[in-house]
Amino acid sequence: MQLHFESHPECRPSNLATATSNQDANVLPASQDVSSGLPHEEMPDSWQDEFFSPNDASFPVGTPAGSSNQWEAILRGPSDFNGNAPYPPSTDGLGDSRLIDQHQAFLARNNRGAFFMTDAHKVQTSLRAILHKFNAPLYAFDEIQKWAHDSARLVKYNFADQKLPSLQSYTQSVFQRFDLHGIKPKLISLTLPVEHCKVDIVIHDVRQMVYSMLNNPSLMEDDNILFTADDPFAPPPVSCPVLGDINTGSRYREAYDSLDIRPGVDVPCTLLFFIDKTHTNTYSNLCLDPVTFTLGIFKRNLRNQPRAWRTLGYIPNQAQHGTKALNKAIDFQAMVGVIIKDVDGLNDNGGIRWNFNYKGKEYNVVFKFTDLFITGIPKVATRLPPTTSPELMLFVLVGYAMFLLKVLGTLMKIVGR
């Protein structure tokens, strides 16, 4: 047996370059001659004594003192847990006895049985088996143990005395505790106007989604709320030389003016939508377009967090619904229209009454809603139905016109040549 501490060309594939320093090796064509970058001369016999120092703390426990060849001592066999010397090889000609000697020493240390397990070992091994069963990441082992330890020590949760709920019953208790029954999804069947096929669209009640945000104390904290001059009834500035959050933009002022706000009563609550495609399989041929939204009364730092967003519905995969882009766009508009059709109803009866505490003062207000903007990938924005935002559709049409003019100018240049 030989151990190589150098990267010799004969010890590696001909097309694999040796990694020097901390850089990764590069795979090169087999025909290209690559030098290893390391010396290949024979190592002197004294290299072991230079590599290992008798006082080296990293030197393996159990090496015989005064050994003239420390590396050979390492290869001789493992030391026992008490730091004794490795098991010497047998010289009686009846076979190598090092493994059976090691086994007998192992049995001697474990007087309760060769495979006796403490209660802690049993619990930890069971947890490890659960992680393996569900292909969970191994770092979850430490996290779960810490969770169990903190549950028992900090909140005095006794697992033995508790009737452990199933996931379904736990979910029902959470829905009951936080009044979330209204956000349960429902299916709406729609016959697509172009492809004439029936699709099921998953939607959520927009009022209940708004309620789930307004009723969440972690979202409605003072530091998360965006009001002009810290006054819920203060109008946004007519113009602002320095742009800040969304309430300093001209679009926000236009939305405010469109709501017919009653001073001291109404508070504008704009809706910010986001539509983007997500993939549900490895090969990216099964897709969904979630239609999500958040409230404009939240500051940007909160809007950047997923917990501040709610999903109104899902546009199902269109891969099997024809191939023409125009047909898909029309069907896309029809499905978006089903999902957002109840948004305008938020202002029925003048808006939604609500009370909240802000900066130590109790407010009783009426929230009035309007869409502020819709973000997403460009091709999604061009598919949105005209009823969503006339300003947005005008922007899209202007963009198309500018694109056509650019194409026309390019063609004229080509013809002129």
Image (tube, grey):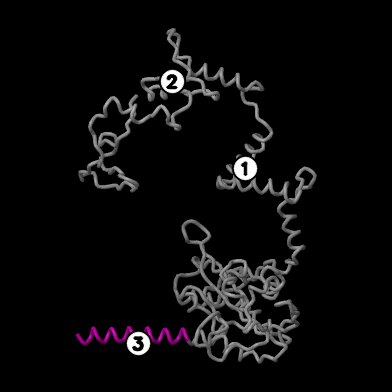
Residue drawn at x 30%, y 86% is 409
User: Which residue corresponds to mark 2?
Assistant: 65
Residue drawn at x 56%, y 17% is 104
| Residue numbers of the magenta segment | 395-417
**Would residue 235 be found to the left or right of residue 56 on screen?**
right
**Would residue 406 be found to the left or right of residue 91 on screen?**
left
Q: Residue 42: x percent and y percent? A: 24, 29
Instruction: Estimate the spatial distance between the alpha carbons at disc 2 and disc 3, rounded to whole Å.
Output: 88 Å
Local secondary structure at mark 3: helix
Circle on res. 321: none
Instruction: Estimate the spatial distance between the alpha carbons at disc 1 and disc 2, rounded to whole Å.
Output: 46 Å
Residue 396 lies in the magenta stretch: yes
**Would residue 312 be found to the left or right of residue 333 on screen?**
right
User: Which residue corresponds to mark 1?
Assistant: 130
Q: Residue 173: x percent and y percent? A: 76, 59
Tell me which amino acid carries mark 3: Leu
Instruction: Estimate the spatial distance between the alpha carbons at disc 3 and disc 1, rounded to whole Å.
Output: 62 Å
User: Which residue corresponds to mark 3?
Assistant: 405
